Amino acid sequence: MEIQNGMEVATFAGGCFWCTEAVFLELDGVSKVVSGYIGGNTVNPTYQEISTGDTGHAEAIEITFDPNKISFGELLEIFFATHDPTTLNRQGNDIGTQYRSEIFYHNPFQKQLSEDYIALMTTENTFGKPIVTKISSATKFYVAEDYHQNYYNQNKTQGYCSYVITPKIDKLKKLYQDKLKK
């Protein structure tokens, strides 16, 4: 999916969107990360509605990136390195279909690369357990309420942020130092 000035879009659901947003905001080549909801049945869902698990939506992020600086494949690698793709409808203590692991592809290339990447990790038994990440065509993405945007950077001392998100950021900085914004 091409958008303005050669930028592309990737959409990932990997548990709480506060966690995934914080990780991808750190990457060089990523110009924007928006938290929201995708993959459900309710039009214009609210956080309160999706939190029940009844709408079918996943908490997700929409990443706008420059493929000349960071590839979709590199985004996939970081996505899989910073969440657990082996737990169905949960990440840590966050439980429910809204916390599922899912890639929402925007074009055939993203779909194929996602399928190939999961197949490789399955063959190599990367996680020691089956990968449950779904691959689905991107549907309507609903932007989450304002207070969810850039949540970690505005609330680093909040308990959830310091205990759940900060370790993910530390892991990112250790493993992908060369991919970070300067």
Image (spheres, rainbow, N blue to C red):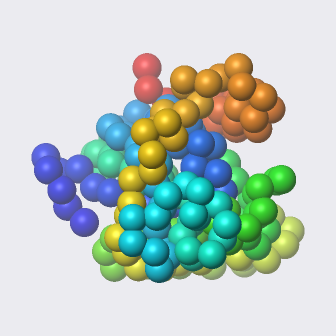
126 horizontally vs 17: left or right? right
Is residue 122 shown left or right of residue 112? right
Residue 171 visible to the viewer? no
Residue 68 x %, y %: 28, 46
Toward which corner of the image does residue 118 lie, by quadrant?
bottom right
| Foreground of the two, 146 or 107 | 146
Vertical placement of residue 160 versus 78, above or below: above
Say which residue appears at 49% left-offset and 58% top-offset: 46
Say which quarter of the image contains residue 8: bottom left
Q: Position of residue 127 (x, y in %)?
A: 80, 64
Q: Is residue 55 left or right of residue 7?
A: right
Q: How many marks?
A: 0
Q: Which quadrant holds the C terminus? A: top left
Q: Is residue 102 visible?
A: yes
Image quarter where the N terminus lies is bottom left
The residue that appears at 65% across and 32% down in the rendered structure is 169
Place of residue 87 in the rendered image (x, y in percent of width and height, measured from the top left): 79, 68
Residue 82 lies, with reference to residue 97, above or below; the image says above
At a point 29% along the width and 45% down the height, the residue shown is 66
128 relative to 18, above or below? below
Camera-side residue of 52 and 172: 52
Residue lying farthest left?
Answer: 5
Q: Position of residue 32 (x, y in %)?
A: 35, 40
Left or right of 135? Residue 162 is: right
Q: Quadrant of residue 123?
A: bottom right
Judging depth in this view, the residue of 59 and 7 nearest the camera is 59
| Identity of the residue drawn at 84% across and 72% down | 129
